[in-house]
Image (cartoon, coloured by chain):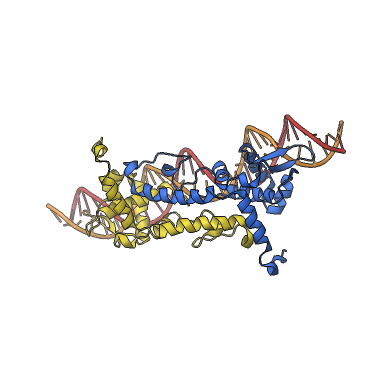
Chain colours: A blue, B yellow, C orange, D red
Amino acid sequence: MKLTVRGEYALRALTHLGLRHSPKVIQISVISTAENIPKRFLEQILNDLRTGGFVESRRGVAGGYRLAKPPEKIVIASVIRHIEGALAPIGCVSENYYEKCNCPDEARCALRSIMKEVRDSIAHLLEKTTLADLVARAEKLRSTDPADADFVI
Amino acid sequence: MKLTVRGEYALRALTHLGLRHSPKVIQISVISTAENIPKRFLEQILNDLRTGGFVESRRGVAGGYRLAKPPEKIVIASVIRHIEGALAPIGCVSENYYEKCNCPDEARCALRSIMKEVRDSIAHLLEKTTLADLVARAEKLRSTDPADADFVI
DNA sequence: AGAATCTCGATCCATTCAATCAAGGATTCG
DNA sequence: CGAATCCTTGATTGAATGGATCGAGATTCT
């Protein structure tokens, strides 16, 4: 699994929405400045998250985005799969995005068997983690180290 | 971590050499045809593995490649790091290829804390796996399912 | 109507990947 | 020695991907 900037932005935006989860919507520009994400790019990403069913939008003057379901129901693995594609380090061990590789005999490929284990450990971790966990961590981390916490330039 | 075709080829070539580990060298063209890897490309990759200290070469008529050290000493994580770069899914949690990310506060980034766990589980798995393990798996897999094993077209 | 905001497709540029090519050196065998 | 064989190095190509921006259109509120 490789998380591109796109995926990173998606998860950071979701965390932002999760921390302020409510029926009220939040504008792209607010998230953009708070999270330091290029606005136009974030636009694309939020739209993508919408078609994936993770957020919902409201247009017009008081428009913006909010989560489409409670944070506990948003599984990180699903988000990454939707934005980035396979979790697996190589196509031939992916469950959701399988691709045949060109090795002589896939069923007896030793590399494949190792990579399968890598995939499983990644998937296991990310399947059990939800946006609620991310939000909880964010809240916990926010309160740590209050000494430096004030040093925001 | 994402394994490109380049890394896949590198590990398959190493496995090939590992299965036939001896002072005698094996030619590029032999590995190329046996493993179904484009010869010119494999040339590049083996050369790269040589500068990484994983294999050594012998020139001339009876030239070729062999492992530079016993399979037990060749750690898969090192190979992947040399060929592909970071194991971590995102730069800001990489131990060997750290890159700062643009989130407002890296030390309190919830995403980073999750990705750190992913990185650790990947690294743990690949650090403890050596080429000897890969070879052992290959040998074990070779003997399974002997019914279909003969059907090589 | 008009302003604010999301929507959606087109486009751009830089980088990476996979692969090939070309020229040259080194080595060994006969 | 000379030729075959093979490694070495660097350049290059073509396709795909990633990051980002733009512009016009649709929607909603006031």
Q: Position of residue B15 (x, y in %)?
A: 31, 52
Which part of the image, by quadrant, shows the C terminus of chain B?
Answer: top left
Q: Could you tell me if residue B102 is visible in this image?
A: no
Q: Taking A99 as reference, is A49 left or right? A: right
In the rendered view, tell whether residue C26 sits above or below residue B30: below
Q: Position of residue D4 (x, y in %)?
A: 20, 48
Q: Position of residue C5 (x, y in %)?
A: 75, 41
Which residue is more in the foreground, A67 or A11? A67
Left or right, B27 with respect to C18, comes to left
Q: Please tell me which residue is depicted at 50% across the width and 43% down the height of the picture.
A: A86
Determine the residue located farthest toward the bottom in the rendered image: A147
Q: Residue at x 31, y 45 (%)?
A: B35
Q: Position of residue B51 (x, y in %)?
A: 37, 60
Q: How many marks?
A: 0
Question: Residue B132 falls in which quadrant of the image?
Answer: bottom left
Is residue B45 in sight in this rendering? yes
For residue B67, what is the image quadrant?
bottom left
Between residue A124 and residue B124, name the one nearer to us: A124
